[in-house]
Amino acid sequence: MKYQDQPITTIELDNYETTMRENPRKQCSIKVQCHIQNRSFNSYIIDISTVGVFIETSKNFSVGQKMALKFYMPKHHQPLRLNGVIAWNGLQGIGVK
């Protein structure tokens, strides 16, 4: 299935969640367009919190790199366009603050 044909999964950040993390994460599957320097790619936000997201990717990026994100949230007709910084890089993706 192509990226454009994938369904959008909605999330709700208002529920209280017991966790050891300072900022609880919510699992999701949100289409996202990422731009880092002269590179762009489409992927999915796999989890989200009030301070960041985890983006699924096999691409290698450096911690500290600035990036731009574009994605849609439920009940919003306009995309969110946010700037972030890569906080960590792992085998399955990147953490962005």
Image (tube, helix red, strand yellow):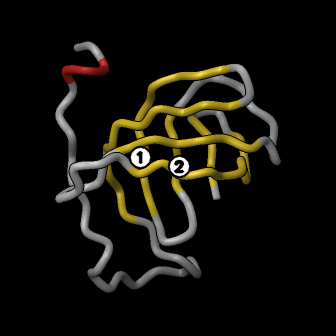
Pointer 1: what residue?
46
At x 68%, y 31%, the residue is: 36
Residue 42 position in % (x across, y down): 45, 25
The amino acid sitting under disc 1 is Ile
Quarter of the image with the N terminus is top left
Element marked by disc 1: strand
Q: Quadrant of residue 76?
A: bottom left
Give yes or no for contact between labels 2 and 1 (Cβ–Cβ under 8 Å).
Answer: yes
The amino acid sitting under disc 2 is Phe
In the picture provided, is 35 more to the left or to the right than 10?
A: right
Q: Quadrant of residue 71?
A: top left
Density class for disc 2 (Cα within 10 Å; few <14, some 14-19, many ≥20) is many
Pointer 2: what residue?
54
At x 29%, y 48%, the residue is: 78
Quarter of the image with the C terminus is bottom right
Which one is in front, 3 or 18? Answer: 3
At x 53%, y 22%, the residue is: 41
